[in-house]
Each structure stands twice: as structure tokens, then as C-alpha cells.
Amino acid sequence: MVADPTLQMNQDFPQRLAQYRSRVERVLEKHLELPDSGTPRLREAMRYSALGGGKRLRPILVYMTGESLGASLALLDAPAAAVELIHVYSLVHDDLPAMDDDDLRRGRPTCHRAYDEATAILVGDALQALAFEVLAADQTPAPELRIDMIRALAHAAGTSGMAGGQAVDLAAVGQTLSVEAVENMHQRKTGALIRGSVLLGALAAGTPEGPLLRALERFGSQIGLAFQIQDDILDVEGDPALLGKATGADAAHLKPTYPSTVGLKSARNRARQLRDDAVAALAPLGERAAALTELAHFVVSRVT
């Protein structure tokens, strides 16, 4: 059987992802060198949570989008770090007993297991505050661009995005949802921050409001939903050793997911359809879309 040429990944692509990860981890390390204000346990737990590995997809999207539009990596460091700090805060809170009650994250004890619940709550609070401080304090982009980026990140993280999606997720436990309702939940809980990452990269590059920014926003929306559907699939059939966390958690918590709603086959098909729609949305970028196209394929073929 002939391999699908769309699945042939550029051999340099994994190396490029690794370079982006290394870069954002150095930036995070720098921003987490916080002054000693008599809170050593809190600062230690923040570093434990933020510097414990991970895919770093969101900062990668910031870097890749911005570079595709001509921005330097230095210009993209602050928004890349900021979006990852928001993501890590959400994971720390998501793992709490009142939420998903998870014991492992990225192959290590979750923050509240390594420390305690109160510390984990404060870690999430502090990481969220630090994210906006990092964006606001960065003097590289013009002030109006910084305001736009702060607004974009806040919108992605708030009631219209990640926090609202988590509320929908908690309210849906034990219920049977329609496909449309599951997609709405996923678009908010996971998709909004991924879409926001694409927008941060585009805004940092000085992309004005218009067709190109809307095309990139559509790209971010499609891969954000595809990413969460693939996460749902991996929770059913993934390898816990590769994932760094237990599988089957969604079913154990009676959470409606894409596979539980439409089945694994339809979930895979929907993820591929979203990938193809995302790639199609990149048409206005022409050849500049090559890296983002590869990333779209990576999102739905990943095993971690």
C-alpha cells in the first residue's frame, strides 16, 4: 500500500519543534526566577509545575505563526511564555480533587500531590498573574500591540473561552450531549487557548485586522478542536507510559467526549476533516504556510 504523502513529515520538523520547546523553556526559566518575598514553597511549586516538560504546543504555535509572518523569535518570546503560563495554571487547577482529581501530570505527581491543595490553588493564581505581567512588561512590541495581545489572551482564558469551557465540562458530567454541544465545550475549554496562541503570534508580527488574521483565526479554531478530539481518542486507546498520565479518566468520571458521543471511527474522521479545513484556511499565506501545515498533521497523528 502506498503511504499517504500528506503524512510524510519533513525530517527537520521534529528538530524545529524541539528547538521551540527548548527556547520557551529558557524563557520560562527566566521569568520564574522570582524575587524572594518570603514565599519559597509557592515559588518552588510554580517552577515544579511550569518547568516539568510537556508538548508546549501553544508556545510553538506562537513561534511558528509569528515566524511565518516575518517576526523574530525574540519578539515572540513574551507571548509564547505568557500563553504557556496560562496553560500550566489551567492544568494545575484542572488536576485538583474538585475538578478532575488526577494524580499524574507529565509523568510526575500533580502539583497538589507533590505539595498540597492550597499550594496548588495559589500556584494557579500566581501563574495566571505572571502571564499577564510578562506580556505587559515586554517593551519589544508597540504599546497598542501589547494591549491587543493582552486582550486576546484574556478572552481565550476567560468565560468565553477556557474557564467557561471548564464550567460546561463540569456541568456535563453524567449527561448525554449532542455532537454540537461536545464541540462547543471543546472549542472553549481547549480550542480557545490554541486559537489564542495563533492570534498572539499573528498580532506580535503586526498583522492587522483583515482577511489574513481571520484566516489564521479559523486555522487556530480548527486545529484547537482537532487537538481535543485527538486527546479524547488517546484517553481511550493511548499508552499511559507515553502520555505521562492514566488513560480512561473521562469514562471513569462519566464525562461526555467525542468518542463516547459518536464512536472512535467517527472521531478519527472528524479530526482529519478539521485538519484538512485548517490547512485550507492557510491558503492566503501561500508558501509561508508550510510549517503550520505540518503542525496541523502532527496534531492529529500524535500519540502523546
Image (cartoon, rainbow, N blue to C red):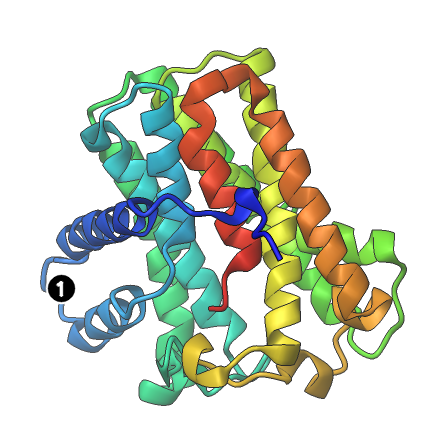
Q: Which quadrant would residue 282 be assigned to in this image?
A: top right
Classify residue 61 as left or right of residue 226. Answer: left
Q: Between 294 and 213, which is closer to the camera in this rendering?
A: 294
Q: Position of residue 274 (x, y in %)?
A: 68, 44
Classify residue 118 as left or right of residue 216. Answer: left
Q: Between 58 and 79, which is closer to the camera in this rendering?
A: 58
Local packing at callout 1 (Cα closer than 10 Å; few below 14, some 14-19, many 20+) is: few
Classify residue 71 as left or right of residue 271. Answer: left
Q: Spot the residue most to the left.
A: 36
Name the element at disc 1.
Answer: loop
Which residue is depicted at the point 37% across and 43% down? 10
Q: Is residue 153 visible?
A: no
Q: Position of residue 73 (x, y in %)?
A: 22, 32
Q: Spot the residue most to the front.
A: 1
Q: Position of residue 171 (x, y in %)?
A: 77, 69
Which residue is depicted at the point 49% across and 51% down? 298
Q: Between 130 and 67, which is closer to the camera in this rendering?
A: 67
Q: Which quadrant would residue 256 be assigned to in this image?
A: bottom right
| Tag count | 1
Please identify the quadrant where the N terminus is shown: bottom right
Reply above or below: 42 against 15: below
Classify residue 168 as left or right of residue 220. Answer: right
Q: Which quadrant would residue 112 be assigned to in this image?
A: bottom left
Which residue is depicted at the point 36% across and 35% down? 64
Q: Amino acid at mark 1?
A: Ser
Q: Which residue is mark 1?
A: 37
Q: Position of residue 123 (x, y in %)?
A: 35, 68
Which residue is depicted at the point 55% across and 42% down? 6
